[in-house]
Image (cartoon, coloured by chain):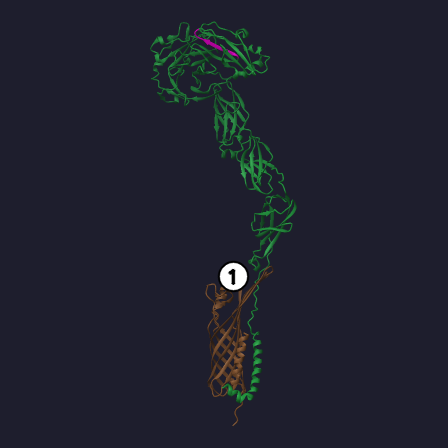
Amino acid sequence: MKKNLIIIIILITCVNILAQTSSLEISLGTEFLQLSDFKDFLNSSLLDIKEAGIEAKILEEFPNFPVFSIYWIQGIKDREYQLITGLGHYSTGSRIYYEDYSGFYRNDILINSLSFEMGIRLPILVMRNFLINFDLTAVYQSYKTEFIYELSTNNYLNHYKKKYYHNSGGLKINFNNQINLKEKIYLFLSVGYDFIYPPTIELQDIGETYFIDPSNNKVDLNMSSLDLMIGIGINFQTQKPESK
Amino acid sequence: MLKTVFKTGYNQRFATLQNSSILIIILFLIIGACDILTFKPEDKFLFDLDPPEMGELDFHLTNFSDTIFVWGNQFNLEYSITTSDSVAFLNFYLDEEFNCSTTDTTQVTIYTQNLTPGSYILQIEICLKTESGSLEDIIGEEYFLGTYQYPLIYYDTVPPYQTQIIAITPESGSLTLTWEKYYFPYFEAYKVFNTKEGNNLIKEITDQNTTCLVDSFFLGGYTQYRVDVEAGNYLFTGEEYEYFDSYNADILNLELIDDFLVEVTWDICPYYQNFSSEGASYNIHETMNPGNNPIAIVYNIEENSIQDEVLFGSNNFYCCQVANPAHDYYDVIGDHAHIEIGNSVPLYAYYIASDVFYIPSHDSFYLVHDINYVLHTTRIDAQSYSSQAETNKAIFFAKDGTSAYSKDYFDDVIIEHDPVSLSTICEYDLSSFIPEGYESCNENYITVLTENKILYLIRNNDETMYRLYYFDLNNIIDPDFLINRFPLDISESGNFILFGSTNPTDDNVYLYQVSGQVLEFLGSKTQEHSDALFISDYQYLIYHEMGECWIYSYPENDFLVSFSLNYGLENINIDPVTELLGGQLSDNNQQIYMTFDLGLLEVIDTIPAITYIDINLYNNVLCSTAGYFYELDNKLDSK
């Protein structure tokens, strides 16, 4: 993760040197993730637990947790398009839980994703205080999937925690609507969709063994999602206009 | 392009670069804030479940009492657990040191190889499943705990043990034995014996908790039991226990139904279960003590009377035996009962053949089974037998002389003979052989000795003299062959008559006794028989009894009789006998009739232990009084 951050920072710095204008967009929103395999896996896990006699419940089933992202948009001289560089973070998870007087049982899955985007932004509609852009970016995502199992009673304790790291990539299309508030500040609302190639969770510690569901199918981490974001943008004049 | 950029606008852009650096710092701060936006599930689900309460628990040892006595390297501990909960497992500790664990709710093997002789505390932890459905219960970690402690004494040698029978009780038609439970280890079996006659194993019980036995063989009376224990290659012999039962198979009543019928009633056996299951029977004996041939065998336990036909003797003795055919040591023999018959009823029976009699009042024939010992008879209805022309071993006449019957000695039945084949016999006029002054005694004095030989007895008019004729029926048409072989005069009733054949092929002698109105056949003897020895062609020692001896000789012959008294290893020869005994020697040409007075015993009076008396003829032993010594002894007492 640290290595990825360093690469990203270097790229931002270099592009920034070339840029004529820059703007920073900070957005908060939500993603409608598919995660279909994981949801199936969660339900089948609950059935297994109930068969063992534990009347557990699914308390969390991969909810749409807030997405946080930052975009750095740079305009190049004599070019209509702008360069987009962005970072995003997304987190979700699940929980199966049971507790009585004798102890508790929990089965958590936590998914953390850090994405890096680079692409171009084309203006589609330009009005005085209103602007609609079309973004096309390449997306690189790094995932951390964490499985936590814990059974704790008065006379018994079993705690299991395992993390898996995976990388994947894809394309993202996005429509960005801007409304200028002041000279350098604008609000924007964007709607987009991430096409992410779903990685299969490989159990690295056991070699080429994959995480499978009770039906003996490989469990894919399908992170393709519909994004809905709202944010604020700040324009920076990085290059003084030439004097006539 | 980069080169151009750096040359032309580096200074101008430096301020912008500073702004960008600020933004990057902001970026780092934002990334740090991502932790805040990381998904962290916090919800909890508390299932409403109350902690369970322990139910009842009862635990006790089944193969030990409260104190455990053991020896050897290990022992088997058996126990029973009564609880409303399920038993998960049990832990066993010896002096707080873990020994073993088991899930078996009935027994466990405790290892004692490291123990030294002495006292220990055996602690037992019983873990019961709560079955509450809680998380801890599901993973098998939630238990109710019950703890029990027992003193344990470890021996280095086998401790002494003797099984005690606690009680023997008659219940529900059987007999129930109860004994002390064996509480030592290594139990293999209880062995229950009936020791009334030796060690008769009733049952071997391998269940240590079974300390009672229903003796399905017992029928009453006295018996004796013992319970041994087999354990760890040892046999502990139990204590003998006697049992007396009030039931003793007594004869309750003897009642004379008619002249020759006695009803015998006995006590019913109370052990009806054993009686029916073991195939037992009431065996009624017409004697003081049971022999091999009961007169009746009754298999129905509720039947307690029979009717017995009696013929001979004035006194009849009966006894009841409850017999177990498979286990005769359980037989119960009751005291005998006595009834007088002959004194009140005049006995009038016709002697028909060697062991067949006719009773006019019954109009029946009776077959005597054993004339020498048992006077038991079988009633034979002559009319019920069909006519069969068979050649059997013997033929006899009915009282009127018109019917003839054959007897098969092998099958022991009497069959009415074909009258046609015997018509010549019946038509023959025997009276032609009666000399003047004599008359036929009675038609029943005609007897058939074999299939074709007849004995005919006549007597004189004043009934003081008898004469016997012999006929060979094969030559009946030749009057000359009707040999008056022994025109024997019998001077008094009670004398014996010896009949010998002139036929060389017939070497038998036949002995009869005139007793009242009956000519009684005592038996036929060959010369090899010791009781009636064939001396020569015409000399016979015929009978001896109670110190009396009759010797018949034909033709006249001289012989000398002597006696030997045997006591211990010594023999005393008394010779000649006539001088010492004052015997009566007849001068009849046909016989020498001697009666030896028991004065002989006066001579040997001082000899303490007479074993037998030999009667010698020409220094050859003719017979011995060994078989009659008892009677001799009685005579001696009476003297």
- Describe the element under mark 1 as helix, strand or loop: helix
- Chain A's colour is brown
Furthest residue in direction bottom, as rendered: A244
Name the residue nearer the viewer: A15 or A126.
A15
Q: Is residue B371 above or below residue B111?
A: above
Horizontal relation, residue B38 to residue B514: left or right: right
In this orientation, does residue B172 appear? no
Magenta-highlighted residues: B547-555
In this orientation, does residue B13 appear? yes
Furthest residue in direction right, as rendered: B119
Q: Position of residue B625 (x, y in %)?
A: 52, 15
Name the residue nearer the viewer: B486 or B404.
B486
Name the residue nearer the viewer: B126 or A81.
A81
Mark 1 belongs to which subunit?
A
Q: Which corner quadrant holds the C terminus of chain B?
A: top right
Q: Is residue A241 above or below residue A4?
A: below
Q: Is residue A169 magenta?
A: no
Name the residue nearer the viewer: B356 or B311.
B356
Q: Is residue B96 above or below residue A129?
A: above
Q: Is residue B549 magenta?
A: yes
Q: Main secondary structure of the magenta part?
A: strand
Horizontal relation, residue B362 to residue B51: left or right: left
Q: Is residue A172 above or below residue B178?
A: below
Q: Position of residue A121 (x, y in %)?
A: 48, 82
Q: Position of residue B217 (x, y in %)?
A: 52, 34
What residue sits right under mark 1 in the picture?
A50
Q: Position of residue A237 (x, y in %)?
A: 54, 87
Task: Give the letter of the green chain.
Answer: B
Where residue B200 sits, quadrant-wise, is: top right
| Amino acid at circle 1 | Lys
